[in-house]
Image: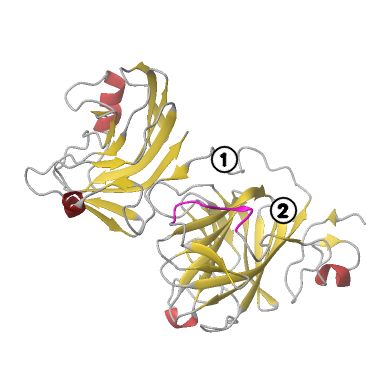
Amino acid sequence: MILKRVRCVWYGGAVLGVVHLLGFSAFAAGAGFVSLFDGETLAGWHQVNCAKETFTVRDGLIVCTGKPTGVLRSDKQYENFVFEAEWRHMKPKGNAGIFVWSEGISAPGVPFARSIEVQVLENEYGKSDWFTTHGDIFPIHGSTMEPDHPRKGSRSFPTEERSLPAGKWNKYVIVCLDGSVKLSVNGKFVNGGSQCNYRKGYLCLESEGSEVHFRNLRLYELPSSGADTSNTAPLVEGFVSRYSGVDLRGWSVDSEVKKVWKSDDWRLRCQPSPGDRRDLVMDGEFGDYSVQIDYKWEAKDADAALCPLLLGGRPVWPDEAMDDGLKTALKGLKPGKFVRLRVDRQGEVQTVSLNGRMVVKNQAVSRSRKEKIALRNAGVEATFSSIYILE
């Protein structure tokens, strides 16, 4: 039978008016839903910025360790849909989330993706004037939303407290349609928002500090309402994270390197001692590729123009000599604030972008066919995150 989308009447304990279909009873029984988890593998999902053991499958469940903070992303984007998920925290005060209409990789300077977050908090986390543990909804890291039940800024609070404590299963039904999002917690719609941007993007499951389980992930996809490039998350390019968030696997390390470079959840810290300039070298060699990192120099008196990245053993830009466009861009940077650096190397030219703006285009470089990539120890304390490679 044909599913026809109509405008929404959201509350009253069911999704009234979301669809004309087979008969509401058939919809409620699950007709037309597609499983997003086969119970055995993570097929259809991608570990964005976590260790391989952060999200695994055990006993028919997606098991998340909570370490590091990061996300598991759907391979496919969705616009209008009904998404069902069951979750349980395994310890009190657990923290996690479900992201809808999400970007495909982490936003600059954070382990989270730009998205609308549907909060997944355990009851003993508590509540305050600006959050609850029963299904808050809010835009993060560049997304926007008009909250149905505002309390602080753009965060929408649930009308009832319905989630169950650690060890017990909770069921979310999340309905996303025409830029509006509505949430049912354990059988009743209690929260929502509208005028969301984005209104088409990826789904993500969030890891944030403690063990949480997911099961029965199902999605009913509804017809498009014409989301365009202005309100659709960019398609992923294929970047792969090269930092696990839990240790220095994938990097060339010894006991001396470990004295300088420290894994700190989603952050990777460089803490040099005087005269110590040990760089952190990535395993492998690379031909044509793109590398993207977030970095910040911690000291207030640090030179923000220092280059944090070595390609083929050389800084992407020399500290003492650079072209005028790059000089101007670097003058606008501040110590203590994350910068997103992207370098695209194809053949013997490179393009450099800072904070999403191209500052060097098709610059000639002298390089080997294959070269090493390293995070630079510039002699000052620094923090790195979101280290991605695209080959």
What residue span does the magenta drawing correspond to? 42-50
Please say if 68 is above or below 376. Answer: below
Q: Position of residue 63 (x, y in %)?
A: 53, 69
44 within the magenta span: yes
Placement of the N terminus among the 4 image quadrants: bottom right
The dominant secondary structure in magenta is loop
Q: Residue at (32%, 33%) from the top-left corner?
A: 372
Amino acid under disc 2: Asn
Q: Along the horizontal axis of the image, is 140 left or right of 109?
A: right
Relative to 151, is 102 above or below?
Answer: above
Mark 2 nearby-residue class (10 Å; few <14, some 14–19, many ≥20): many
Q: Position of residue 78 (x, y in %)?
A: 67, 50
Above or below for 179 versus 218: above
Residue tagged by mark 2?
80
User: Label 1 amino acid?
Assistant: Pro
Is residue 200 among what the camera can see? no
Q: State how far apart marks 2 and 1 are (Cα).
A: 17 Å
Residue 50 can be seen, yes or no: yes
Taking the image as shown, residue 103 lies to the left or right of residue 362, namely right
Disc 2 secondary structure class = strand
Q: Which mark is residue 234?
A: 1
Q: Is residue 252 left or right of residue 346?
A: left
What is the x, y in percent for residue 272?
Answer: 14, 48
Residue shown at 34% from the left, 60% from the top: 265
The 10 Å Cα crowd at callout 1, few under 14, some 14 to 19, many 20 or more, is some
The residue depicted at 18 percent of the width and 51 percent of the height is 260
Extreme-top residue of the structure: 364
The label shown at residue 177 is: none
